[in-house]
Image (tube, rainbow, N blue to C red):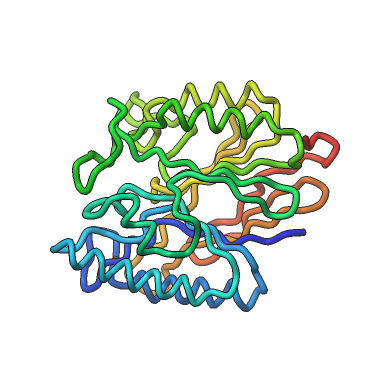
Amino acid sequence: MISIGLLSDVHYAAGKANGSRYCHLSDAKLKACLDFFSREGIDHVICLGDMIDKGDHPDDDLQNLNTIAGILQRYKGSVHTAIGNHDLDSMTKDQFLERLAIRSKMPYYAFMICEDQFLVLDPNYKTTGEAYTPGQFEWDDAYLPPDQINWLSSRLSLNHYRRTFILSHQNLDQRFCNGQADPHIISNASEIRRLMESKKKKITVLQGHYHHGYFQQMKGISYFTLKAMCEGSCIQNNSFAVLDLYDDGRVVARGYGDQQTVEIESCPSSVLN
């Protein structure tokens, strides 16, 4: 069995709270989460975006990111992160990745853990196809451009992986709110779902953005949305998970704090590609 630490929507901002987001507590929550992962002997940690929240000045965002980066860089295992929309409120993608300094500086990329591949997406584009620039976008307008869809298709066509995990801050599944598509969903998500379904592979999507958390399976693909770490008015209101990948094909997200435990996949290894 392989165990991987999962967290999302840290939204750290010193001295700030925004509604139910207690941003000023998130550095302590992140430290507590990583301390737990360390005690569990977890070698790999995945962050699903929105590491910071918007401060009163761009310099505040830089300082907040430096605080979070310092906490992550002290972790002895490997750390990977997707880019969230709030990470780009006052800096470019390149600036965010350079300052985070915990992995190769690419907005989307692939990595392996044992026999499984992990594909990190960057849907931080407007529906018009323009990449997000600092503060010049709406949180509910996300899009995956054609070059990334082609890259995703080529990666999903490879046959030398047991399982594939797709990581995205914005969501790829389908939910409705007042009869309309949930605004947390990527605008061309239906195209991406059709692509994933056509590959007939064992795929799990891990995502953040929707702070309440969610889980569903659609046409053989599992979509697990992690609850936001920033929600809750005290340190104990933390949310994170340990993703257990069993040799027999089961995938379980063990929830901690306000995050529930979810059996993501229960199928036997005979159906793994």
Between 192 and 29, the one lying in front of the other is 192
In the picture as drawn, the residue positioned furthest to the right comes out as 270
Between 188 and 155, the one lying in front of the other is 155
Looking at the rendered structure, the number of numbered marks drawn on it comes to 0
Q: Is residue 115 above or below residue 65?
A: above
| Residue 188 in which image quadrant | top left
Left or right placement of residue 219 versus residue 23 in this view: right
In the rendered image, is residue 14 in sight?
A: yes
Between 191 and 70, the one lying in front of the other is 70
Residue at image point 28% right, 32% down: 130
Left or right placement of residue 257 versus residue 176 in this view: right
Q: Is residue 197 above or below residue 116?
A: above
Q: Which image quarter is the C terminus in?
A: top right
In the rendered image, is residue 231 in sight?
A: no
Q: Is residue 140 above or below residue 69?
A: above
Left or right placement of residue 14 versus residue 11 in this view: left
Residue at image point 56% right, 37% down: 216
Residue 106: x and y in percent read 45, 49
Residue at image point 60% right, 56% down: 261
Residue 3: x and y in percent read 68, 61
Q: Is residue 210 above or below residue 33?
A: above
Residue 60: x and y in percent read 20, 67
Q: Which image quarter is the N terminus in?
A: bottom right
| Residue 6 in which image quadrant | bottom right
| Residue 220 in which image quadrant | top right
Left or right placement of residue 174 versus residue 137 in this view: right
Residue at image point 63% right, 56% down: 243
